[in-house]
Amino acid sequence: MTRDRFERGLFRVLKPLVILFLFVITAFPFFYMVTLSFRDIQELILDPGSIWPRSFTFDTYANVLTRQGFLTFMRNSAIVAVSSVAVTLLISIPGAYAVARLRFFGRRQVHFVFLAVYLFPAIVLAIPLFVLFTMLGLRGSLLGLILVYIAQTVPVTVYMLRNYFETVPQSVEEAAAIDGCTRLSTIWRVVLPLSKPALMATGLYAFMIAWNEFLFALLFLVEKRESWTVSLGLSQLAGSIEIPTTVLMAGSVVLTLPIVIVFFAGERLLTEGLTAGAEKG
Amino acid sequence: MTGRRGGTLREQEGRAGLALISPTLVITLVVVVLPLLWAIMLAFQDARLINIRRVGIFGHYTLENFGYVMSEPGFWTSLVNTLVYTVAGTALSIAIGLVAALALRDRFRGRTLVRASILVPYVAPVVAVAFLWETMLNPQFGIVNSWLGTPIAFLTQAKGSFLGIQVPVALLTVIAFEAWRYFPFAFLFILARLQALPAELDEAAVVDGATPTQRFRHVILPQLWRIIALLSVLRFVFTFTKFDDVYLLTGGGAGTEVVSVRVYNFLTARDDIGASAAQAIVLAVVLVVFLTLYLRFFSGGERDQG
């Protein structure tokens, strides 16, 4: 047997095993999360090794949504995420257009600023912002949190959008200008309709950052329970012994599900946008 | 709209450009750049939340915070922990991501499903997955421990023996979490690069009689080095200052304290803003030093190859 045939045979056997392994380590925990969320806590304690519930219960969800206040947390998260997306787009669309099309003083240096913000450690930023928001009495308000999320996402979204805007043919814009469009109405009527996929991807990215974020939510909101986001709520309640684990698992599902749905709805747009950007950088 | 303020077209374009980019620059300046400068100032001041209004901009500057922070017993241990956690987490996540990308390169039935499944750990909120791991690894009712003969306290045990060797149990668990959560990130980037590779090179190597491992070593891997190098930098930077994962899994206990968790504890529990800022600055400086060394070493290596 030659080395070539040996190796081909070996990989033919190894490859399905590797794929199976990857599938199990990624899918099983989430499968377990979902099944656990429908179980009674007694069942988990009596029989911790079982992976399929003997009886399904929805009490865990009723409990976590109303008694533990996850409905309020979800409302807060939704407010934060949706406003972050809206303002991020509002700011980054003109910014990205300027970087893609217009020659202005400092255009080349702008990239450097964005890269620096993208790589910048959040923990360093957390200190002065914590102090500032304490002084301003903004701690406990969702507004401050939204502001921080916008600042953290805008550099990346400008970059993602710029890459797309550059693919819009300049001749289309020139035609619009000849037809009497001003610069802003060219952006509004020509560039944006042509860039829908990129706008979707950018919006999704901003949404995911805002929905998943933990550190700043912890620093700004922890003392005010009615302002908690879902992430913060779950992390704070996870330490308590009075709330059954299966109820909190229902909370995890409530936290995870929206983001997974949003991600797979726009997955192709998102991964293409992100990896394409990285290739060029 | 243009032409109102005169000047050449080029000048108008420049003004419009600055006007359109200014919201972006303003929010970056106000929420990122100015706070950063303030953080540096705070590191050199004796600042606490109680006296912060009196400290002011022109207050008393001192190196005391740095001396205090570095003489604290836990600091150097946490810096070493950070380094071990970062290097191991980065290397493992990229290695698994590479294997996953190679395994899923060619089409097969169910590839879409497997690919989707692989992405979920990265997409899911960190709080949810950390809680999931905590539950699965729980010594009393965790499912992983129900499979083991003797339960292991994965997240609360600093040291344990494995085959007679002392191992840092909790630190290894946190590293495993890091690898599990971030290998999809590496997978996505490497797969995108793999699928963009020209097929001709690989086919030519097959014709020349190269075995699969030879083709990987001499044809595919050289074309992946750039993306792997980029991923290493990105993951190193992100992991080195990461707070959420360790804080949520162990709270920094059981020998897993990393510098960012210390920064948080000094800020909130001890209310020592100055010392907290000093540690964050040390962390950032160490990061920059490592990056500089890496980039110098790496660009040197590239010159040798070319």
Image: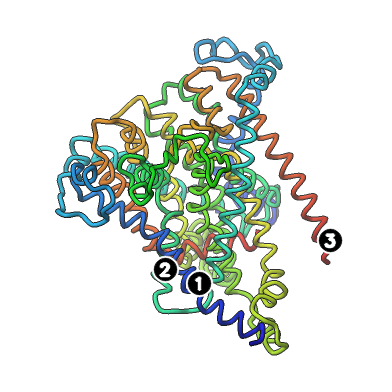
- Seen in the picture, residue A201 relative to A45 is either above or below; the reply is below
The CA span between labels 3 and 2 is: 39 Å
Q: Residue at x 52, y 68 (%)?
A: A176
- Residue at horizontal 29%, vertical 49%? A253
Marks 1 and 2 close (CB-CB < 8 Å): yes
Q: Which mark is residue B114?
A: 2
Are the residues flagged by discs 3 and 2 from a single subunit? yes
Task: Please tell me if label 1 and label 2 are on a single chain.
Answer: yes
Q: In this figure, which residue is indicated by the disc labeled 1?
A: B104
**What is the secondary structure assignment of the residue under circle 2?**
helix
Kind of residue at badge 3:
Arg
Q: Tell me the quarter of the picture where residue B210 sits.
A: bottom right
Dot 3 surroundings within 10 Å: few (below 14), some, or many (20 or more)? few
Q: Earlier in the sequence, mark 1 or mark 2?
A: 1
Q: Which mark is residue B303?
A: 3
Nearest to viewer (mark 1 / mark 3): 1
Q: Position of residue B297 (x, y in %)?
A: 79, 51
User: For the residue marked with disc 1, what is the amino acid?
Assistant: Leu
